[in-house]
Amino acid sequence: MHKTLIISILFVFVMVTNDIAAQRPRISQRPQMTSMTISSDHQAFWLFLDDVLQNEKSVMSIKVEAIPEGEHYLRVEIDDIDHHTVGQTVRLQRSNNSYWVDNQRHLYGISLGHGVPRPEAVVYYASVQQNVPGYHGYAPGQYGNYPPQQPYPTPQPNQTVTVIEDAAMPDPDFQQALMLIKSESFETTKLNTAKQVLANNLLNVSQIEQICRAFDYENSKLDFAKSAYNHCVEKEKYYLLNNVFEFESSKRALNDFLKDQQ
């Protein structure tokens, strides 16, 4: 009698344990998390992933963190009068999840591109499917800025990371940004990429000079030199940028600009 009772108890215990184990998701079945960047050199935009808005204000470049790997529907709405929209299904993997919003004769498209060294915004993936393994429940548009000390930090919930006010961009990060600027084929794209670097970084005079020398035309050098002034940690040395110009008219234009800033 006792032997039969013990066997029955063991049978019930095994059945309950197996049922619990079957209901528990295996770690290997949980989707891996990844990130993606998308940028534009012509117009700010709103980003939708799986028809869910990711950013609360329009941006020129954005990085989305903690996205489950796999297929997602990527849609971009341009911040213009007509609100042009373009979308396509993309497969996000562990790397190379970088996209570019193209504009050819007012026809928009999405293509593979390079990641920007300092996206204008960093947000967590917002999803309506809150039961997806790995979903953190973050609201769309939670922003953070990359600090200059580390190029790709992992943001924490409800944390806003700010740039140190008096620190110029570290050289390894700057060289990565400079290489990206130089790799662009078109002058306007170079200039827009350089201005994106300014968005969340401070530079010293030497770094500004190196970027100016990456441009082919005097007006681009002058445009960037003026744009970079308020992001420079060595304003007292700004006159040294005269060395990047070939024409006296450009030097005078910069000097006049500096006088207006005093």
Image (spheres, rainbow, N blue to C red):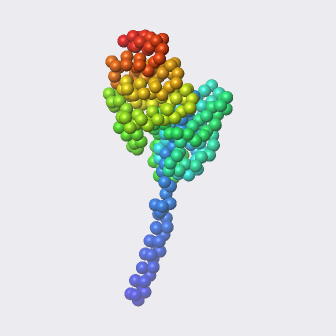
Q: Is residue 101 left or right of residue 231?
A: right
Q: Position of residue 42 (x, y in %)?
A: 57, 28
Q: Is residue 197 above or below residue 72?
A: above
Decide which of 220, 39 is in the foreground and name it.
Answer: 220
Count every numbered label the image shows and give the total.
0
Identified at 67% across, 28% down, the residue is 105
Q: Quadrant of residue 160?
A: top left
Identified at 49% across, 35% down, the residue is 180
Q: Position of residue 162 (x, y in %)?
A: 37, 33
Is residue 134 visible from the viewing direction of this image?
Answer: yes
Is residue 53 visible from the viewing direction of this image?
Answer: no
Q: Residue furthest bottom?
A: 1
Q: Position of residue 196 (x, y in %)?
A: 48, 30
Q: Residue furthest front?
A: 246
Identified at 65% across, 27% down, the residue is 82
Identified at 62% across, 46% down, the residue is 89
Q: Is residue 172 left or right of residue 31?
A: left
Decide which of 169, 55 is in the foreground and name it.
Answer: 169
Q: Is residue 213 above or below residue 16?
A: above
Q: Position of residue 115 (x, y in %)?
A: 50, 39
Q: Quadrant of the N terminus?
A: bottom left
Q: Quadrant of residue 102?
A: top right
Q: Quadrant of the C terminus?
A: top left
Q: Is residue 29 above or below residue 136?
A: below
